[in-house]
Image (cartoon, grey):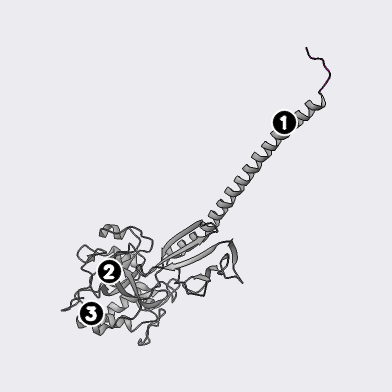
Amino acid sequence: MRKSRGFTLIEMVVAMAASAIVIGAGMTLVSVCVRTEAAAASEANRQNTARVVITLIEKLAGECELGKPEPTGSAVRLQTLDGKTVVYYDGGETVYVSGDAGSGTPIITGAALSAETDPDRPGVLTVTITYPGGEKYSTSVFCRTWEAEEKVDLDTLPFGENIKEFLQCAYDQYGSHGEIIGGDGTYSYFSEWYHGGFDGEWNENTPWCACFASWCIDRVKDSIDGTPPTYAKVESWVDSLTETDYILPGSSDVKSGDIIFFSWGNEEPVTSLAEAKRTHANHVGIVVKVEEGKIITIEGNSGGVVQQCSYDAESPHIIGYARLSFKGSDGL
């Protein structure tokens, strides 16, 4: 039996050393846990801030408000159609929102942002945020302000005079911001013409793509059999279509002079008129020509102006076409 005489010096040293080892191991574990949690928190923060930027871009694209980025050296500036900067990358390590380096709010530091286009997919913009080490967050969105490389020479296309007159009417308004170029002075804007004047609801800032297409149709109505369609709302236009005048997207039957309908939020190919009517159509244009899997159009209120655009014929944003019954003339 051991006497009750306390610990010897050696025993105390051994006990203290053992305690130190245990405490040290515990501190190491705590340190590892803290570093792990900090790394996880840092990654979560990067994900969250990147998602804020990407969600903003996707929202603007979905609402057809994202303009085509203009090259500014190594910097990237994404703007709304009316020129307001919504995302700005300074070319270094900082991404700003709601303005540039002088006026925006820095939301991401220590990362690079790129905005790239694909020549094989007109209108598709891919935005990527890259952190050191290769961590990336990316989104691809449709930006409808792409203009075809060169305006189509209507004299080179083999369609009849009625369709040529229709398309020429549209091209005569090229660059218009909603105002009628060369009008008789009765109305100043396409939307004003459609409604017979402005009131508290309709004004020069009202979405006017359907009014523009309707105005062009009205200019050549004597060359069209039956009652030509005229609408101010794209969705109402699509709702009015029947199986006899509707053409599925991707069809080889698409011709010059057809009316083309879009739904910018649609992500799956439309396979029927019923599906097209459920997509909430929100833009309309006029087909100029079809070539090499691309649809070239002329549209009102595309990026705020009348301009020529080009799309992949298989784009899910195209939800169909309508055929006008021109007298004695076929499209291309």
Q: Is residue 196 visible?
A: no
Q: Observer-nearest residue: 168 or 112?
A: 112
Badge 3 vs badge 2, beta-carbon distance below 8 Å: no
Say left or right for 63 vs 225: right
Q: Mark 1 or mark 3: which comes first in sequence?
A: 1
User: Residue 247 location in percent, x, y?
Assistant: 23, 65
Q: In the image, which residues are magenta?
A: 1-7
* Disc 3 from disc 2: Cα separation: 21 Å
Give residue 144's quadrant in the image. Answer: bottom left
| Disc 2: which residue | 293
Say left or right for 138 vs 237: right
| Disc 1: which residue | 18
In the rendered view of the protein, which quadrant contains the C terminus? Answer: bottom left
- Label ID, residue 129: none
Does the magenta stretch mainly form a helix, a strand or a loop?
loop
| Disc 3: which residue | 163
Residue neighbourhood size for the residue with mark 3, other residues' Cα within 10 Å, grouped as few (<14), some (14–19), many (≥20): many
Badge 1 vs badge 2, beta-carbon distance below 8 Å: no
User: Residue 186 location in percent, x, y?
Assistant: 37, 85
User: Residue 189 location in percent, x, y?
Assistant: 39, 80
